[in-house]
Amino acid sequence: MQYLTQKPSLMSLALASVLLAAGSAPTLAQSRPLSTSMSCDQARGLIASKGAVVMSTGPSLYDRFVSGIGYCTPSETIIPAFVPTKTNPQCLIGYTCMEMSREEKRN
């Protein structure tokens, strides 16, 4: 009896590669920079260069930090953000966006 053997096509190899890459994407998306592994200047520089960054500040803590009001929604304002870093326990790295109160929105 003769068995037919078929070599994998380029399309099936490409599809397998895409599926493998898609399976690892959620793991990559979950990694965030950790403020305590950076110097104060490095953390501040990261926010300044990216504009907006979701950064971990502890084992289960994270927030979104921005370099200016342009990274917030129109109904938000900015407040200074201080985080622990390797070189400074209260490093001013930028800002966080905060919803404005009704009074602030009227003015």
Image (cartoon, grey):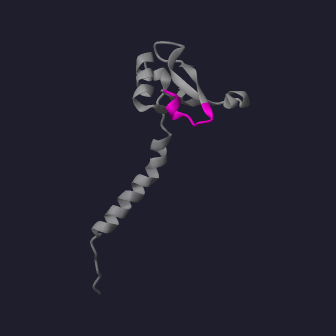
Q: For the view shown, which residue lies furthest in the bottom direction? A: 1
Q: For the view shown, which residue lies furthest in the front direction? A: 107
The span picked out in magenta is 68-76
* Residue 1 image point, x, y percent: 29, 87
Front residue of this view, candidates 48 and 91: 48
85 versus 14 height, above or below: above
Is residue 10 shown left or right of residue 31?
Answer: left
Query: Number of labelled discs?
Result: 0
Query: Is residue 13 something that shows in the picture?
Result: yes
Front residue of this view, candidates 59 and 96: 96
* Residue 40 image point, x, y percent: 45, 17
18 versus 29 height, above or below: below
Residue at (69%, 31%) from the top-left corner? Answer: 106
Is residue 70 shown left or right of residue 45?
Answer: right
* Residue 10 image point, x, y percent: 28, 67
Residue at (47%, 43%) from the top-left corner? Answer: 29
Residue at (31%, 67%) from the top-left corner? Answer: 11
Q: For the view shown, which residue lies furthest in the right direction? A: 102
